[in-house]
Amino acid sequence: MPPFDDWNIIDEEEEEELQDASFFEGKRDVILFCIDCSESMHELRDDPNYEDVKTSHLFTALEAAVQIQKKKVIVGPNDSAGIVLFNTTCSSEAKNHATEIKKNSFVYQTITPISAPAIQELIQLLDAAREDPELLRSTFPPLTGKKMPMGDVFTSCNWVLRDGAPKTASKRVFLITDDDNPHPGSKQLLTSARTTLLDLTQSGAQVEPFFIATPEKPFDPSKFYSSVLLPNVLNDDDDDNEDTGVLPESISITRVEDLLSQMRFHEVPKRAIFSIPFRLADGFVIGVKGYGLVTEQKKGSYKYFIDLGDRMEVANSRTVYLDEDHQAEFDKTKIVYGMSLGAPAVEDGSDEEGEGTESVSRIVPFGKRPFYTADEIRSFRTLDLEPGIKLLGFKDREELVFEDNVKHSVFIHPDELVCLRPILGSRNKLSMQKYSGSKRTFTALLKKMIEREKLGLVLALTRRNAAPIFCAMLPQAENGDEGEWKEPAGFHLIPLPFADDIRAAPMEEAFRAPDEVKDAARAWIDKLCVKNGAYPPDSYPNPALAYHNAQLQASAFREEFDPEAFEDLTRPKYDMIHKRAGNLMKEWKRALVNDESANAVIVTTGTKRKADVSVDEAEIRSKHEAGALGKLRVDQLKEFLKSKSQPVSGKKAELAERVADWLDSH
Amino acid sequence: MFLVDVSPSMGATRSVELPPTPSGEERTTEMTNLEWALQFVKLKIQEMIFNGRKTDQCGVFLFGAEETNNVVNSKNGGYEHVAEYIPIAQPNATTLAKLDAIKPSETSGDPIDALIVGIETQDIYLEKKRTWTRKIIIVTDGESPIEIEDWEATVKKMNALNISLTIIGIDFDDDELPFHEENKSTIKVENEAFYHKLTSSLNNGLVGTCAYALQEIARPDIKQTKSTLMGTVLRLGDVDVRPEEAIEMIVKVSKCTALARPKSWKKFGRIEDDDEMKIDGEAEQSEVFAQLKMRTEYYIDRSTQEGEEQDQMDVGSDDEEDRDKNVEKVEKEELIRGFKYGSTYAPCPDGQFPRLNTRKGIDICGFFHAKNFRRDLAMGEVQYIWADPGSPQQQVALSSIVQAMFEKDVFAIARWVSRDGMDPRMGVLAPTMFEKIDCLLWVQMPFADDVRKYTFASLENLVSKSGEKITKHPYLPTEEQLDAMDKFIDAMDLMDAGEKDDEGKRIPWYDTRLSYNPAIHRTKQALFHSAVVNDIASNPLPPPHPELLKYIEPPRRVLKHAREAIAECKAAFKVKEVPKKVTKVRKDGHVRARDEDEDMLLLDTMAPVSRKGKEPALSHVASSSTMPPRTPKKPSDSGSETEEESDQELLLLNKQPANPLPTPDRSMSPDVDPGRAPGRIIGATYPLRDFKKNLAQGDVVTKAVEDMGVLIKEVVLRPFASRRHKEMLECMVAMRDTSLKEDEVDAWNSFLMDLKESCLQEPGNPEFWEEVQKLGRSISLISDPEAKKLGGSSEFSESSSEAFIQQ
């Protein structure tokens, strides 16, 4: 068997285009919810959504944890989650095994791969708590009078993570609390908190704090947390803003109602898809990281399972290459690449047909090699370029037209550190290159390009196995209100089509509308135009994906799925459209009918010797009313259906029925 | 139909330039004119194989052949030395193999005879296939006598049959290439003139020289795909409930852009000669390559227990063997399809759940101003939306909408369902007006699920920990830097860097319509090449066509103008490259998000703004109750000193707790080493002492090892380093020992490789490396078995480590 990692990198050149999605699935994510259980978190408040229902911060936090887990389980079925409560007297003997969980913290859910029963258990608890608001308080009695040292909290988190989280996963702690100053006056505890937090960070976990603020009790991070949460603590993956003396950017202070939506932003761990040098000119190179900010989220792919009696087990698949004649597995490293040999010889027997197999083979004199190796193949694709982005020059903003699009864009952000991937073959040569000054250069470039309304033209080879592409580099300024998610500053790389990707317009001439009809159309367009609107991605969750996930969840929870309850938010708002523009649309239709050219008949200059199939809609309609559709020929029916963009398959009876249906509905 | 001249003169050899070897030497190879010209034929035939159309067929005739074998001869006699070599058929690899067997003959043949035979044969073959296009290609050197009577009759016949004729002449004169053969024989001059006369009297005739033909055949050529028009419906409003108001239009959609991909490679394997008979029987050995077939196998891992399920990524190479034992192959038939829901399993035998009920068509949801369109959100290929070509009314209808949208400068938001029951997509419709037709363009936009809202550190709004805005920082560009960038942008402008248009004005450089995808065309060229040559080692692929490379560098003119601006930028920004080592794996087995040490070097190169003390050192301050779980400290003789330092730190912290910039550890080290660079914890004066001291301190192992490596390299590469060789070797021994024990294996290995490379380079220190080599295996790369003993791992095997030190 080839070495393990060999068959793990299954044919990189084939994976080339699969890219982003698989990348995200490949890595696993662990989230530990670390929720404050103190007096104030338990305090009952009126539910903002339902009358006569009491809720508490703790309840909301737990509910958010449920929602996040529900979402995560679908996006990444291998992800894990856990819940730790602190500042509670609830002792954690029952659940923890052999770990040193500090006093007053309680592991409600150890870190395990998210599973339906665990989520259900939590949901049941929350349902019960909704009925009996005091339930949470009795289940997780708050620690009264004093606060647990934050240092201990972090230590507990560290232990919990160590026990449950897989080695390679990205680990994050979602810290939820409403207390901006747990240890007034104690420098000692502050230092210890900082130290233990540092330990936590060093073991690979990031802390993402969610601070709850209320009008009565605003949250002031400078009291305690800004000195504890050193920026490098929030070293999320790339932000090496250590030593910058800068406030961490990912502190979220929210009203409790927004807790869930805040968490949503952090739901997916931020991962770069590449980290490569960006060459502005010879000897003028900076480092950048690329992120896929727009990537199609697909339904999870199904897996094959085997029933082992007591449990179901996933079967891993593996691709092997066989040589047909010998039915033997072929060593992957020895595979060579070439051109398909065409259809097996049809007319002659001179080829080695004697073996009785269909396989084609190519015979050359000994020692000669008519095929390429994998490395050679790669060099053809990349033109021997090394991964990187190369600036070719600047153009005016208008040069990027609507139709020059083939693929989603990639976002780049400066990075002082760049990892150059090992060269295949010489696998051990992994080198990191650091470009100090990347940030200031990047910022200057961005600022000036926005000011001058320019865009960059770059040649990009983002990964060693990809093919070079030209991209338009569109600057993006930082944008957004305080506290909300901000549009980050950086460049969007928009892949431009090659000549090979561009298709000619198949039509060149058509009737055009006179001004009257255009004005009539303008009237309803005016009414249906959203002022200052833009395309709002947020208001369109993918209905097909949601529908699929809802069924998946129901199936996992062993619940009945109710298709009626499903709401598709992408459907047009018919009522609004008709209310606003219904009459104008009617007007336009009238103008259209009155237009002369619209009633012109196109003289077909076809040379085909086909029977005349052009059939008048009025004629067919009259036949239909007379119940005589059957008298039409099949080709006539088909032609009619085709002109109405209807399917043209089936027997005559089906066609006639389809025509009848269409006429009935129009 | 290919007519190939195999007269003796075709056997003349010529030397052909090959692409230079990797080392840059010019290479040439000897081949006969025939072989050379056949490359063209083979490439042409290869293209047919590549396209794989049943309606692309070809046949090959030889003239000047020894034997005579053709239809005209067998019917009427005459037409000697014209042989049907390959009958007309769809070509395949065998066709190419046969072409390889063509050898120059002893007699000469008349191309016109061959032409007439070719026309006749083609006509017989295509009797029932009147619509096929007929092409005849003659490959000749023009050295054989031609019987030039009646050629007008042949021309008439060819024009009647609408045959196109291409003559590929070896060393024919060509003004465009330019090429002119010296000492041309009279007969060739005459023949060339005749060929020109012949082709010009044809409706469709062409003479070309072989060299040019070979060059042109490598030119990127775009495969024009005609997009099919797909019918669908454009709707606005509720057509079911309020049909009198709702709009419904029949439209056709077709692709405007479609991502083209390189042709895939087929996988081949060399078949091992297992039947010895073959070898014994044939004197000439041959290698057989067969195409490989793919098969998917399924495995389950019985050892996996619930809860600790590991995926493939996690399994390191070390426990691979255990894994193999537990892995069991299963047949696909036994498997059930389903989805994973966390660790729970949701069966779904169909592979998918029932789909959302949708109706085919494009529904307009609303309009918005084009200026608010986020170009970066566009997700995929662009589609045209046309009005029904058969209905003027529909055309006017769509045109009115397009014009109105254009006038108001708005785009529409629309929901597209490609077929009944298909998953809907959201997108934007943009109005487009061509010269004589109006249409809409569609591009898919993301759903809420598709947009990832990562948070990024702000580039310009840096806030200090005390909450103040920072205006000066190494991360922020200065005014001077901004100015330099401004000039750079100006200098690199491409708007007038292209070629001149008809009016003499320069047009922008770069046009998508002229940019060929190098991957596609280079791959195709390589595919063809491998199909026509038998050994790519001795006859490597020629370089890519210049057309493919024209956009991969900025235009030279622009670069020339920008030289000054670039220099200014370089000076202003001072971007530096600092080679770095691999991120190391921590002892506790956790991968850190990022090693905080890694920024230390960066800071060295900048003004010492706010260098923070070594955080790990601070951790010793922890109060007893919160002693963090950490790896045991290395026992050391200077333990007491550590305590002291810790206390000092604590004191410092207590004194100035509000200080946002923790004190650098330098200030608290008792004696400042003059040889120690800022940010380093190992000085050049007493490196070994510094190293040991730092190790004793515990958590700075990574940094210590790293600094030690940097320092050794620095010292060794300095002039007059020899007096410190011995000391450096001692340092290396200590460093390796520590690396091995403290799981800094990767750090050591990358250090050593780097050191070796640097020493052996000019100006390096080869003497030092020799001394290192004398220490032998014990100083070489840490191998995996070695590392494993202490719970680590390494990417090197024992033997590669052995080899490394000996070379």
Image: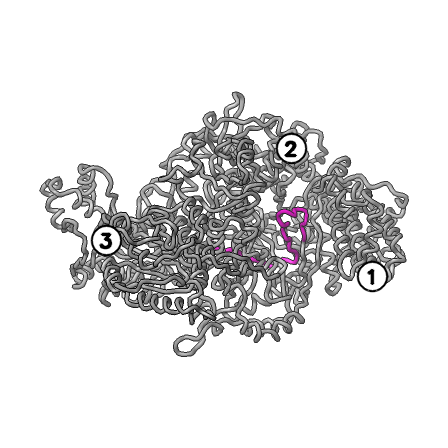
Would you identify the image quadrant in which residue B355 lies? top left
What residue sits 58% from the left and 67% below the top? A445
Q: Residue furthest bottom?
A: B504
> Which residue ends up furthest to the top in the rendered image?
A309
Residue on which the image places disc 3: B245
A469 drawn magenta: no
Q: Nearer the viewer's eye, disc 3 or disc 2?
A: 2
Q: Which chain is home to disc 2? A: B
- Tell me the SS state at disc 3: loop
Q: Residue at x 52, y 69 (%)?
A: A394
Question: Callout 1: 10 Å neighbours few (<14), some, many (20+)?
Answer: few
User: Considering the numbered disc 2 on the image, is that residue within a helix, a strand or a loop?
Assistant: helix
Tell me, yes or no, whether the two marked residues, 3 and 2, touch with CB atoms within 8 Å.
Answer: no
Residue identifier under label 2? B320
Q: Which residue is mark 1?
A: B718
Q: Please state if B641 lies on the left or on the right of B442 as rendered.
A: right
Amino acid type, mark 3 = Glu
Q: Amino acid at mark 2?
A: Glu
Residue B308 drawn at (x, y percent): 62, 31
What is the distance, in whole Å, between disc 3 and disc 2 at their CAs? Answer: 68 Å
Q: Position of residue A582 (x, y in %)?
A: 26, 55
One can see residue A128 in this view: no
What chain does mark 1 sit on? B
Q: Secondary structure at mark 1?
A: loop
Q: Which residues are magenta?
A: A408-431
How many other residues sit within 10 Å of disc 2, few (<14), some (14-19) or many (≥20)? few
Q: Amino acid at mark 1?
A: Arg
Q: Is residue B732 left or right of residue B431?
A: right
- How far apart are the alpha carbons under marks 1 and 3? 86 Å
